[in-house]
Amino acid sequence: SSLTVLSLVNAGISTIESNIFARFPNLRSVHLDYNTLSQLKRAYFSGWNKRHNSTAFLSFSYNRIANLDAGCFEEISYLAMLDLSHNLLSEVASGWFRGLAFLHTLILSHNQIEAISANALYFLYDLRVLNLSHNPLTCLSERTLSGLQLQTFIHLDYNILSQLKRAYFSGWNKRHNSTVYLSFSYNRIARLEAGCFDEISYLAMLDLSHNLLSEVASGWFRGLASLHTLILSHNQIETISSNALNSLYDLRVLNLSHNPLTCL
């Protein structure tokens, strides 16, 4: 078959026949959004790698997916984009994304994710966009994000994180050597550990807007010599420590609007 794009959106699909995709040797893009799938099984994609050798894109948004088999996509070694947004996932488990060395975009927004296994993202060496926004995450496991590298955009907006700990980013600097963008807007963050981002030496943009910060403390942004954009708007900031921003040598945009600051 010469089929390269398969789109079965809003088709009432609740299950997929095993090995079905292996029948289409030229298939590159699969869109099964707005269906009623409740899980993704490894058998659905069995045989894919034997017949495919170029970039693949999969989209399963707006289903009812609550679980994935471990190694579910392992035979799609060239999978580049995976969209699992608007589903019923409650966790990101170890092994789900095993073998996806070429995945550059992973969209997990608008689920019910409360936990991410410590090594769930560890082998995603080419990941550049990770979207975990609109989930009820309250914390991150130690080293959750440390396996990522290259230029990475991480969206953790609209969760219920109450603090950011240095342990979340432990080990990062050993595996990263290019620009990183982090967004934590619309959480409940009230404090950051001193040196929280110490190991992300190439952090370029940090968005902490729409949180519950009452101060900008000394040591929070220590070592961020490459940071060019810092967004702290829509918090409850009343004070800024005198040396809190001293090490931000490359800072070009500082947004402190919508805070109850009375003096500097």
Image: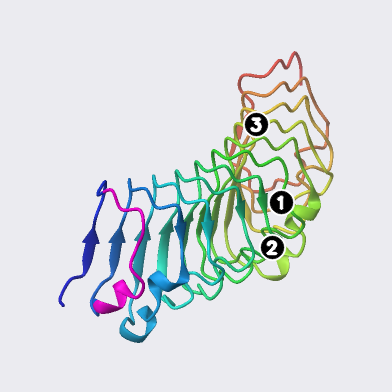
Q: How many angstroms separate mark 3 from mark 1 (CA)?
A: 16 Å
Which of the 4 quarters of the picture holds residue 45? bottom left
> Eyeballing the image, is 214 above or below 251?
above
**Closer to the N terminus: mark 3 or mark 1?**
1
The disc at residue 224 is 1
Foreground residue, 25 or 263? Answer: 25
Residue at screen point 28% across, 48% down: 12
Q: Which residues are magenta?
A: 12-23
> Eyeballing the image, is 247 above or below 92?
above
Q: Are the residues flagged by discs 3 and 2 in contact, CB closer than 8 Å?
A: no
**Which mark is nearer the camera, 3 or 2?**
2
Callout 3: SS: loop
**Closer to the N terminus: mark 1 or mark 2?**
2
Residue at screen point 29% across, 65% down: 29
**Closer to the N terminus: mark 3 or mark 2?**
2
Kindly identify the amino acid type of the residue bearing the numbered disc 3. Leu
- Residues packed near mark 1 inside 10 Å, few (<14), some (14 to 19) or many (20 plus): many
**x and y, in percent, of residue 177 in the image:** 62, 67
Residue at screen point 76% across, 16% down: 263
Disc 2 marks which residue? 146
**x and y, in percent, of residue 76 in the image:** 41, 75
Foreground residue, 211 or 25? Answer: 25
Kindly identify the amino acid type of the residue bearing the numbered disc 2. Ser
